[in-house]
Image (cartoon, grey):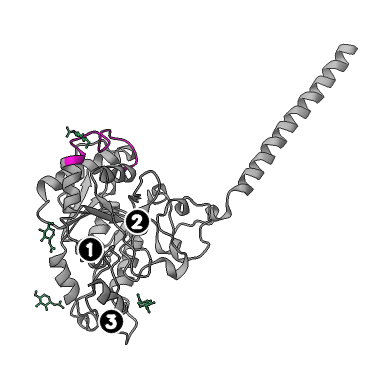
Amino acid sequence: MSVFRNWKRMTVTKNVLVALLMGMACGFMLAYVSLIPMGALKLNLNDAHYSSQLEYAEGPTYDPGVHNHEEEFHNMEDTSVADNLTRKVRVLCWVMTQPKNHQKKARHVKNTWGKRCNILLFMSTAEDESLPAIALSVKEERDFLWAKTKEAFKYIYKHYLDKADWFLKADDDTFVILENLRYMLKPYNTSDPIYFGCRFKQFVKQGYMSGGAGYVLSREAVKRFIEMGLHNATHCYRGDRGSEDVELGKCMEAVHVKAGDSRDSHGRGRFFPFVPEHHLIPGHVSKEFWYWKYIYYDSKEGMECCSDNAVSFHYVSPNQMYVLEYLIYHLRPYGITYHVTLSSSHPDGISLSDKDNKSTIAQNN
Ligand SMILES: *[C@@H]1O[C@H](CO)[C@@H](O)[C@H](O)[C@H]1NC(C)=O
Ligand SMILES: *[C@@H]1O[C@H](CO)[C@@H](O)[C@H](O)[C@H]1NC(C)=O
Ligand SMILES: *[C@@H]1O[C@H](CO)[C@@H](O)[C@H](O)[C@H]1NC(C)=O
Ligand SMILES: *[C@@H]1O[C@H](CO)[C@@H](O)[C@H](O)[C@H]1NC(C)=O
């Protein structure tokens, strides 16, 4: 009898225990979910924050085509200043890609912004003459991006160093406005050791440039990277793994390549690690989001975020590349014309925009 009673009590205790544990687990989950900053959950498909969110994104199957330059509205355009800059500030663009993205992503870079580079190369692990993609001998893994970056710059140093003035690295989900990049670079001498991008302040004393927003090296910076950096283990990391952008940042600092200031005269940014929506909509991401701890300069949300001559945006899906292409190079509000006057630059490197006041320009000349 007493054995039976004891057994019953034991079952009750066991059930209570299981219920208690389940309750604790549920309670923990609820509390955990409610503690995640709301901003982090508000992210949507149009505004990716991780490359995995764009992994399966594909562009149009059929080529969206182009407008004829003889059309009335394109015929009214005066591109002579930009055309001159294309000759004076020659930019080689190299785009980090991989064989499975040649058709899905790289092709759409070539169809849109890539065609405005003086030289366009895709760095991959399989050759593809249509892009063209170069087969670097590295492992094709996200973990090996640093190795790939080193090999890409070695290749460029060997074959292209005198064929361009500036050397831009971008991803296959970066969108770049080449005209604004050339305008920003115009005051600088490519013989100076300097590089530009979206500057982050962690890990490296002078900061480093976010990989996704793209970064651009002067010819001297590429030379030092290869000649001093890669031939001396005390300067640049010899291993294959690690964050490509942080390692490059450490390496640039070690070989005395200056981290340049890419902001415009209003202090607005030009290189962006996310799509415009992320930066333009106040409160879109929580203040806890890592970006705020990383960004080097005080940066604002809303219209104040972004320069009128922004250079790059990241996590742009292949479809959105065509949307940006249309908005930037085609859609025009009728009756508004824009006269470009070439302006000078700030000694610290903050280029003055066209509407800047004359006193500032005169001071810096
Ligand atoms: C472009 O360059 C040419 C030749 O150097 C020059 O004659 C012309 O004035 C320039 N045009 C503009 C708009 O800067
Ligand atoms: C750029 O710098 C190099 C080396 O310091 C110098 O020889 C050259 O004249 C400079 N170019 C310009 C346009 O200032
Ligand atoms: C590597 O760099 C360090 C620091 O600048 C220098 O002392 C050393 O001589 C360099 N080694 C080689 C092989 O160039
Ligand atoms: C013009 O420049 C002066 C001197 O740098 C400055 O105080 C002023 O705010 C500027 N004005 C505008 C409209 O940017």
Disc 3 element = loop
Can the viewer see residue 317?
yes
Quadrant field for ligand 1: bottom left
Can the viewer see residue 126?
no
Q: Is mark 1 within 8 Å of ligand 2?
A: no
Amino acid tagged 1: Leu
Instruction: Decide if residue 345 is on the left or right side of residue 293.
Output: left
Q: Which residue is mark 1?
A: 185
Q: How many marks?
A: 3
Residue positioned 20% across, 80% down in the render: 78
Out of 101 and 95, give the one closest to the viewer: 95
Q: Nearer the viewer, mark 1 or mark 3?
A: 1
Crowd rating for badge 2 (residues with CA inside 10 Å; few <14, some 14–19, many 20+): many
Mark earlier in primary sequence (2, 1): 1
Residue positioned 76% across, 24% down in the render: 14
- Residue 111's image quarter? bottom left
Disc 2 element = loop
- Which residues are drawn in magenta? 228-244
Q: Is mark 3 within 8 Å of ligand 1?
A: no
Q: Return the x and y of residue 196 as percentages of the image width and height.
A: 28, 56
Crowd rating for badge 1 (residues with CA inside 10 Å; few <14, some 14–19, many 20+): many
- In magenta segment, residue 235: yes
The quadrant of the picture occupied by the N terminus is: top right
Q: Which residue is mark 3?
A: 338
Q: Return the x and y of residue 115 as percentages of the image width and height.
A: 20, 62
Amino acid tagged 2: Cys
Disc 1 element = helix
Q: Which residue is mark 2?
A: 198
Amino acid tagged 3: Tyr
* Spatial CA span between label 2 and label 3: 27 Å
